[in-house]
Amino acid sequence: MSAVAKALSPHAGGASRFERNAATRDAGIVKFLVLSLGLIFFAIFLLMPLVAVFLEAFRKGAATYFAALVEPDALSAIKLTLIAAAIAVPLNLVFGVSAAWAVAKFNFPGKQFLITLIDLPFSVSPVVAGLIYVLVFGLQGWFGAWLSAHDIKIVFAVPAIVLATVFVTFPFIARELIPLMQAQGRDEEEAAISLGASGLQTFFRVTIPNVKWALLYGVILCNARAMGEFGAVSVVSGHIRGETNTMPLHVEILYNEYQFAAAFAVASLLALLALVTLALKTYVEWRISHPATKEAV
Amino acid sequence: MSIEVRGVNKSFGAFKALDNISLDFPDGELVALLGPSGCGKTTLLRVIAGLERADSGQVLLDGEDATDRDVRQRQVGFVFQHYALFKHMTVFENIAFGLRVRPRRTRPSEKDIRAKVSRLLDLVQLGWVADRFPTQLSGGQRQRIALARALAVEPRVLLLDEPFGALDAKVRKELRRWLRQLHDELHISSIFVTHDQEEALEVSDKVILINKGRVEQFGTPWQIYNEPASAFAYGFIGAVNEFRGRVEGDFVRVGDDLLSLAGAKFQNGQDVVAFVRPHETEIVPDIGGGHGITAKVHRILGNGPVTRVELVANGESRKGETDFFEVEIPGTQLASLGIATGQRVKLTSRRISIFDQQNGNERP
C-alpha cells in the first residue's frame, strides 16, 4: 500500500547503481537463476490464467462472446457493478481524504485507534463483512423488523450491495494518502494561511494539488476492488438474476450452469478492467516518481 | 510596527516550552532569538505569528491586543526553515499566492499582481526564475523566494524561523549579509530565530538569548558577547574556559589551586563557577608561586596571527572526563613565553566572571 511512499523515496534509482557497481554485483549465474525463477512463476501463475480467460471466452467464436455480453442478465450485472462502484468510490474518496487530512494534519486522542480501524476491512474476511450487514439489516437482524414495517429493502437488494462494496473498499484511498500527507507535514498549509488563505482555499489550492497523484492512485485501486468484489457482495446479494447480481456473481452463476463460454466472456471483461487499471496505475506511479518531468518547462 | 509579548506561557504536555516570557521588541529593528535547540525560541516565534496559541499571556501588535487574532488577520510574514514553497506552483505563482487568495473586493487586478511580483523578484535578485518550479532552485534561491512570497502581502512584521538553517556554510554567509541589507532598505520590524551565535551577533540589531523557555539576556550583540548576564550566557556565546570550585576568603579553590575572586563578593564556602575567555586567559610558565590553575600544555595549534594553546586540566576532573582549556595568544608572544608541549603551567586572568553554581546569577 505504500507504493507512493516507495516511489518518493530517494533510493528509488538504487537498483541500477547496485548493478553497475562491480563490488556489489552478483555472479551472472545468480542473476540468471533469480530472474528465470521469477519469470517462470509469473508465467505459470499470472500470465497463463490471464491468457486462458480470453482463450476460453472466444472458444466458441466472437458471436457467442458478444451474445453473452449483451444478454439482459449480463447487462443488468454490468449496470449494477457500475452503480455500486459509482457510489462506493466517491463515498470513499470523501471519507479517505477527510480521514487522511485528520490523521496527518491534526493531533487528537484516539488517532492511532482510527488508523488501525481504517485497516479493519483489510484484516477481516469479506464474508464476515457481508454477514455483518445481514445481521444488522436482515429480516432477523437488529433493524429488520423496523425496516420491513416501513417497506425498506436493504439486504438482498441494491443498498446492501453498495454498503458491502463501500465497506471492503474503505481503506484504499485513506491508506494511500496518510503516509504521503504525514511525510509532507503542515508547513505548506501554514505558509498558505499565514499568507491569508482561508481553510477551503488552503485545502483546494495547496493540500489537494500536493497529493493529487496519490489520490488518483487510491481511486484507481479502490475502483478496481469495488468492481471485482465477490465475497461480501455474495453474502448480501441473494443472487437474484437480473436484479442483484454483480459481474463477479454473474460469472459464478454462469459457470455453475456449465455455460463456460459465457462465464469466461463476462470474466474477460473483468480481466480487461484489471489490465486497464494496471496500465493507469503504472502511469500514475511513474508520474509520482517523476513529478518535475512534465511540469518543469 | 512594535511587537510586545506579556507573560506568555506554553507547555507541550509536561514540557514547558515558554516560561512566563515578557518582551518588548523594538520598532523597525532586526532582532535575533538565539538559543540552543529545544529552548522554545521557535515556539515563541510561532506564538507571535499566531501559528501557535499560548496557554496564557498576551501578544500585542502596535499596542493592540492580538492574542485572539488569527494568523490571517495578524498581517505577519512568516518564512519557514524548510522554505515551505508550494511545490506544484511556479515561482511566480508562489509569490502571487497571497494576493490571489484575497477576497474579490480587495484582490488586485492581474496587471497589478504581475507588476508587484516582478518588483519582488527584482528585490530578491531572482527575476530570471519566475517560470521555474521550486525544485529547480538551489536552497539559497528558495529561501529568497520564500521571503519574497512573505513580503508580497505587505506584512507589518517579518518573522523568520531559522532562515539559513538548511543551507551550507558559504551560502549562509552570503544570505546573512543580504538579509541585513534588505532589512536596511525596508526597515520592517523583523524577528529571526537561530541557534547559531555567530549568525545572531553578526546580523541583528538586538539579540534575545533564550534558554529553557526563559529569557536569559536581551541586549545588543556587543553586550551579549562582552557582558554575558548569566552562567548560561557565558557558556553559550563564544568559546570559554570554565573553572568550578568553592569560595575560600578572597579566592576560589579549584582542586589544589586557588583563583583570585578579583573583588567579587561571595560567601565563604559557596559553590561557584568561573568563566574566562580564551583570549583573556594568560599562561604563566612559572608554576612556583602565586595563584592560578595548574594545567599541562597538550597541543600548540596554528601558525597564523593567533596561536591556540590547548591544555589539559591538572589531576582528575568531574564525571571522569578530562577537562580541556583553551588559550589564545598573539603568535608573536609564543616565542617569548617559551612553552612546549607537556610542560606544566599556570593559568590566570585579569578578567574573570564568577557565578553562583546554583542559580547562575552573578553576585558582584
Image: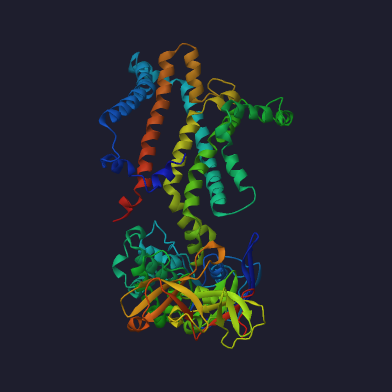
Can residue B156 be seen in this snapshot? Answer: no
Is B339 in front, or is B306? B339
In the displayed structure, A293 sits above or below A198; it is above
Percent of width and height locating residue A21: 27, 42
Which picture quadrant has residue B357?
bottom right
In the shown orientation, is residue A82 left or right of residue A128?
Answer: left
Is B280 in front, or is B344? B344
What residue sits 35% from the left and 13% below the top? A60
Percent of width and height locating residue B27: 51, 83
Percent of width and height locating residue B275: 53, 78
Q: Which quarter of the rendering shows the C terminus of chain B?
A: bottom right
In the shown orientation, is residue B110 left or right of residue B222?
Answer: left
Is A123 in front, or is B95? A123
Q: Residue furthest top?
A: A258
What residue sits 52% from the left and 33% below the top? A84
Which picture quadrant has residue B14?
bottom right
Is A223 in front, or is B306? B306
What residue sits 43% from the left and 65% below the top? B97
Q: Residue furthest front?
A: B288
Percent of width and height locating residue A85: 50, 34
In the shown orientation, is residue B235 left or right of residue B142?
Answer: right
Which picture quadrant has residue B55?
bottom right
| Display colour scheme | rainbow
